[in-house]
Amino acid sequence: MESTIESLPEPKRATYPRHVTFDDALSMAKFGMFNYIIIIISGTILACVLLETLGISYVIPVAECDLLLTTKEKGVLSAVSFAGIIASSHLWGFLADTRGRKKVIVPTLFLTFTATVISSFTTNFWIIALLRFLAGFFISGSSATIYAYLGEFHNKRDGSRAIMGASFVFGVGCLMLPGIAFLVINQEWEFFIPILNIVYRPWRLFLAVCGLPSLVCALALLKIPESPKFTFVQGNAERSIETIKWMHKLNTRGKESALQIASILEEADVLQTKKKDDEDKNTKGFIGLMKLIWNQTAPLFMRPYLNKTTIICVLQFGIYLSSNGMYMFFPDILNRAAELQDTGVNRTTLCNAVYATRIDISVLTHNATDITPECNQKLDIIAYEHSFILELMYALGFAVIGLIINAVGKLPILVFVFVCCGLCGILIIFIDIPLLAMWLYLVLLTCGYCISVVNAVTVDLFPTNLRAMAVCISLMFGRLGSVVGANMVGILLDQQCELTFWISGVSLIGCGVLSFFIPNIYKRETVEPRVSVSSRL
């Protein structure tokens, strides 16, 4: 019997090197359940940003009488959330790089939800504009930081694909936006709230619903640890190793032996960060805080990062100018085209449809409960249909990009999307078939594909200690593009509609040309088989 027992092979035990690089440690944790969970949460947070910033585009056409909105005020309301994002991007980038990714993301999600719910009860244009500004101010903390947070849970090989995976979840989540808008806004109920002296209509409920995902994501992240890369570069290697071990346990569902990692080797960017942190600890007071902020920001605008920072900021500005600035009036323009078609006009350009359906706000009554026949309390079904198609295109596009980005490379994707979308923006001016022009408009708006690709590029270009700030600064310029775009459309739409599409189309083609100058953009992440750990001992 003893000989039988002795002859049985011992159970296989996983063996790992005890001293590994951080990238190898993440590879050892494997890719599994935890990665899918963090990708889903990150993608949902990205969807929260869209709900907070672009959801208002469905409200503007039906709330113009309640809030007595002129076209210019529509532009302000469309852009004010982005103004809030711009105002706070630098602050959140600094805090994310110095205090932690999660410490920024979770509180700002809770604050965003609060500001959004309160804004649904306002009656004055300036008050709702202020609250939408605050919603943008707070959501900015999540919108940029989440890219660094997500990327730092993955090795270099899986980082870009994880970001594109989150973008796919974002696209799927955004599919719900036109559906929710249709189900909520196109209802006919209303009731009066005496205490607030307002008529509560469906568009107000829609605003509150747009804030709910922020609350859900904040609660979900309470159970997720801080980025292991951030804790490591902050000098807490033990906590970083424990996080990686926890990731491995969740990914393998406890079926494998616990990871045996004695230490993680310090690489160049880690040593650089620790040296900077030691210097920062000696600074105190307000002057010291300003010095910290300067030290965190200034390197991005100096050699060797100046060229990289400039290019990604210009690209994000150009992308957001069209993808968000032009999107803010997308439901409104489609609604106008549908109204004109209902009168029997079947051959006209989108701009001519805009000119023919202008509303003179001066004829509206100042009593919000007395809606004139000119006012829309519902959006035409065609606006929802095309919005749903746009979100579906985004979901499918992000899925395809996520599958091919490592094999094809980032440059071909950027150039193809920029040039195609830019040409469609120019063609819209000349097409007099409304349905075809609407489809070209849809393609124009898909330039937003490039946002995640440029963010993936940014994560690769900058070291850990500057990564969140670099993403925040680039997205700050992107949101500035949204503000410029939305106000540009608000000012020019009724008088110079064609010029708005010319600006959008030409700027996107210019971004396509600029993409060739991104450092290391020709380098592709090759998908190699995982090297077994035992072979590296």
Image: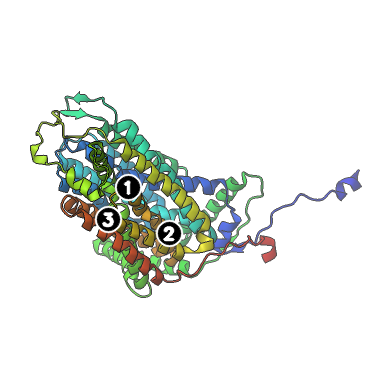
Residue at x 76% of width, y 49% of height: 11
Of residues 84 and 404, the one drawn nearer to the viewer in this rendering: 404
215 to the left or right of 286: right
> Tag 3's secondary structure?
loop
Q: Quick check: 225 left or right of 360? A: right
Q: CA distance from mark 2 to mark 1?
A: 26 Å
The residue mark sitting in front, 3 or 1, is: 3
**Residue 173: percent from the left, percent from the top?**
42, 42
**Residue position for label 1:** 438
Q: CA distance from mark 2 to mark 3?
A: 31 Å
Task: Name the quarter where the C terminus is drawn.
Answer: bottom right
Is residue 375 rendered to the left or right of residue 41?
A: left
Question: Looking at the image, is mark 3 or mark 1 earlier in the sequence?
Answer: 3
Q: Position of residue 502 (x, y in %)?
A: 26, 60
Q: Name the residue located 61 percent from the left edge and 44 percent from the top edge.
A: 253
Q: Is residue 226 visible?
A: no
Residue 143: percent from the left, percent from the top? 36, 51
Residue 287: x %, y % from top left: 24, 64
Q: Amino acid at mark 3?
A: Phe
Local SS, label 2: helix
Q: Visible in this render: residue 361?
A: yes
Q: Is residue 161 left or right of residue 298?
A: right
Which sits earlier in the primary sequence, circle 2 or circle 3?
3
Vertical comparison of 183 with 330: above or below: above
Tell me the quarter of the picture where residue 107 sits.
top left
Q: What residue did someone put label 3 on?
A: 430
Determine crowd level at label 3: few under 14, some 14-19, many 20+ residues with C-alpha closer than 10 A: few
Q: For mark 2, what is the residue?
A: 453
